Image: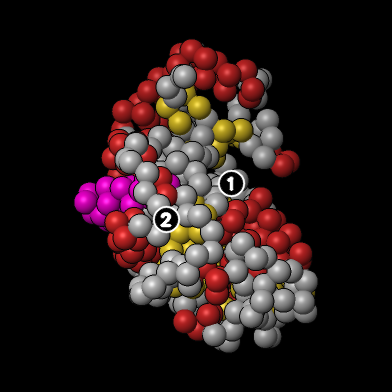
């Protein structure tokens, strides 16, 4: 097996404590010792999400499972859903909402530019849901969530925090977010496989009684894991080792301090942005809305995108990601997340690019 420095759009390198946790002895998913760890994992998620929502727990599946759980439990035929689209994952929100039978109202911004909150709020007089990606992984853009709370009215605010949770400030209660999901493989420093999820009491009261997905039915899941108190009712076999890993990853972040972990991501992003620009690269994302944990940069004219990424991987053991959609072959996506978000990795990548490109 090959050891890599994972600086793509995810997964990142996991924290050492997480790797150790994955090797713990297996427990049954109803074992009292495991249930205690699950309870503590849910409480740690509340701390990192900055919420008091009782329904806060890890969904068994990647961030995409969290997205689907958010929509199938909230949206039914004919419901109006306003979706902000300025990248691939806004597009996926539209796809999932439409499969639920929703009347989707798209509010678009150019890829690389942030969404205008006013346009989202003015898109429809009475939507059931307003859905936005906080940190758009396809473009490296941060969208403003806090500005949506005051004007959302009766609408439920649904937010994708897959690439933001643990890396930049996320304030679920403070921003009035009703439904949120994330992924473990980004700034939480855990392998892919779970989708941290939280739903407000306001949203729970309005959820679909019998969603089209049995596996992602939040009512049934809550009987097992959220709120994680009292007797458990079997729903599915929980991924025990992944819960151990998430428990350890969240513990690592909280031991460091959530604000300190965010500051570490911010510093690495700043160093990477500055270093790339000093080498003559042009950043893709709009200034003022650039993510520190996911940097997008134009591939220079005359440079073969795939050849450089292959050389980085084979010669230096560094993975970076290519662009998607219309920007495939034209943009690089460079992640600096979780345990990977270290100054040494930024320095290594910049030196490797300089060696390959002669800059």
Q: Secondary structure at mark 1?
A: loop
Residue 346 screen position, x and y as percent: 37, 30
Question: Residue 142 versus residue 190: which sits nearer the camera?
Answer: 190
Residue 256 screen position, x and y as percent: 22, 49
Looking at the rendered structure, which numbered label has been put on residue 29?
2
Quadrant in which residue 257 is drawn: bottom left
Q: Is residue 319 above or below residue 144?
A: above
Q: Which residues are magenta?
A: 242-260
Real-space Cα separation, disc 1 to disc 2, in angstroms:
38 Å
Q: Residue at x 45, y 59 (%)?
A: 58
Q: Residue at x 55, y 71 (%)?
A: 220
Q: Which residue is mark 1?
A: 139
Residue contact between numbered discs 1 and 2, judged by CB atoms under 8 Å: no
Q: Residue at x 76, y 64 (%)?
A: 99
Quadrant in which residue 344 is drawn: top left
Label 2 Cα crowd, 10 Å radius (few <14 / some 14-19 / many 20+): some
Q: Is residue 119 above or below residue 86?
A: below
Q: Residue at x 59, y 84 (%)?
A: 206
Residue 333 screen position, x and y as percent: 55, 37
Q: In the figure, is residue 215 to the left or right of 275?
A: right
């Amino acid at each position: 097996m090959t050891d890599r420095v994972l600086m793509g759009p995810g997964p990142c390198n996991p924290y050492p404590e997480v790797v150790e946790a994955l090797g713990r002895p297996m427990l049954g998913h109803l074992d009292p010792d495991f249930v205690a760890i699950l309870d503590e994992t849910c409480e740690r998620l509340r701390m990192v999400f900055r919420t008091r929502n009782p329904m806060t727990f890890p969904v068994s599946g990647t961030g995409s499972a969290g997205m689907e759980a958010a929509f199938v439990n909230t949206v039914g035929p004919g419901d109006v859903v306003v979706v902000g689209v300025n990248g691939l994952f806004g597009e996926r929100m539209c796809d999932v909402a439409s499969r639920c039978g929703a009347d989707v109202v798209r509010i678009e911004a150019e890829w690389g530019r942030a969404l205008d909150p006013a346009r989202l709020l003015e898109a429809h007089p009475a939507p059931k849901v307003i859905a936005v990606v906080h940190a758009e992984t396809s473009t490296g853009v941060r969208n403003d969530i806090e500005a949506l709370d005051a004007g959302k009215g009766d609408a439920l605010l649904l937010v994708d925090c897959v690439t933001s949770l643990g890396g930049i400030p996320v304030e679920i209660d403070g921003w009035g977010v009703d439904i949120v999901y994330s992924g473990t493989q980004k700034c939480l420093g855990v392998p892919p496989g779970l989708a941290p999820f939280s739903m407000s009491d306001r949203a729970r009261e309005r959820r679909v009684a019998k969603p089209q997905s049995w596996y992602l039915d939040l009512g049934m899941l809550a009987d097992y894991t959220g709120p994680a108190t009292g007797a458990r009712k079997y729903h599915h076999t929980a991924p025990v080792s992944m819960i151990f890993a998430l428990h350890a990853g969240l513990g690592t972040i909280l031991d460091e301090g959530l604000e300190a972990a965010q500051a570490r991501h911010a510093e690495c992003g700043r160093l990477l942005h500055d270093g790339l620009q000093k080498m003559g690269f042009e950043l893709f994302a709009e200034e003022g809305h650039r993510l520190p944990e996911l940097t997008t940069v134009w591939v220079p004219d005359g440079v073969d995108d795939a050849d450089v990424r292959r050389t980085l991987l084979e010669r230096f053991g560094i993975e970076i990601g290519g662009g998607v959609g219309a920007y495939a072959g034209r943009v690089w996506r460079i992640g600096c997340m979780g345990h990977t978000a270290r100054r040494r990795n930024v320095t290594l990548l910049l030196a490797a690019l300089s060696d390959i490109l002669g800059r």
